[in-house]
Image: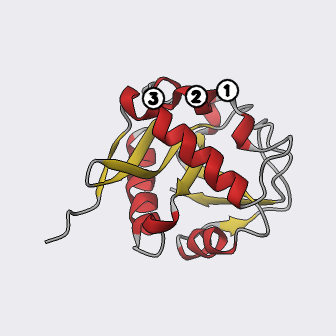
Amino acid sequence: MPTPWILRPIRTTDDAAVAAIIRDVMTEHRCTGEGFAIHDPEVAAMAAAYAAPDARYYVVELGGEVLGGAGFARLTGTSSAAATCELRKMYFRPMARGQGLGRAMLELLLAEMKVAGYQRCYLETTSWMDDARRLYAAAGFTPLCGPLGRTGHHGCDMFFARSI
């Protein structure tokens, strides 16, 4: 009997695995230049970066191996009154794709965003990440004309948001 997939909060011991996933998947999708999240300082210490009460990061695990993750935090460059968070660093290894895990992760995160008090979720992606864009559209995200906040991810060329 196969071991079930587990979605759980990130632990400090997951940091190296999550950093490797982010770097590998972003490289796979040609997102390595300036202006992409691969260069964010938090990539090396994701558990600490998402330890704030209004932030979360979850990993996908199978048989004790971390194969993906995603999280959210307050959208940089917005006030607390704005109540907008950003979906961040949602990446999965190839063996974790096509299993419904992206949808499950997104549903979990949207519920957690609501618990954290957010009213809106924003995200950035690229026009060539087709599967991601389809997932976001299916989850009710709508395209925006331009970026929000100050994420520093000027390499992204597509922007989406939805109410929570």
* Nearer-the-camera pick, 15 or 74: 15
- As helix, strand or loop, the secondary structure at mark 3 comes to helix
Q: Position of residue 100 (x, y in %)?
A: 40, 73
The secondary structure type at the circle numbered 1 is: helix
Residue at image position (42%, 58%) is 105
At x 22%, y 63%, the residue is 4
For label 2, the SS is: helix
Q: Badge 3: how crowded within 10 Å, few (<14), some, or many (20+)? A: many
Q: Nearer the viewer, residue 64 or 5?
A: 64
Q: Are marks 3 and 1 in contact (CB under 8 Å)?
A: no
Near mark 2 (Cα within 10 A), the count class, few <14, some 14-19 or many ≥20, is: some
Q: CA distance from mark 3 to mark 2?
A: 9 Å
Q: Are marks 3 and 2 in contact (CB under 8 Å)?
A: no
Q: Are marks 1 and 2 in contact (CB under 8 Å)?
A: yes
Residue type for callout 2: Ala
The numbered disc on residue 47 is: 3
Q: Quadrant of the N terminus?
A: bottom left
Q: Which residue is painted at 51% across and 31% down in the image?
A: 46
Q: Is residue 152 left or right of residue 55?
A: right
Q: Nearer the viewer, mark 3 or mark 2?
A: 2
Alpha-carbon span between mark 1 and mark 2: 6 Å
User: On the image, numbered disc 2 is attached to which residue?
Assistant: 44
Q: Mark 1 — residue? A: 41
Q: Residue furthest left?
A: 1
Amino acid at pointer 3: Ala
Query: Spatial distance from mark 3 to mark 1, Cα to Cα?
Result: 12 Å
Instruction: Give me the disc on residue 84.
Output: none
Which residue is painted at 46% across and 60% down in the image?
106
Decide: is 117 above or below 69: above
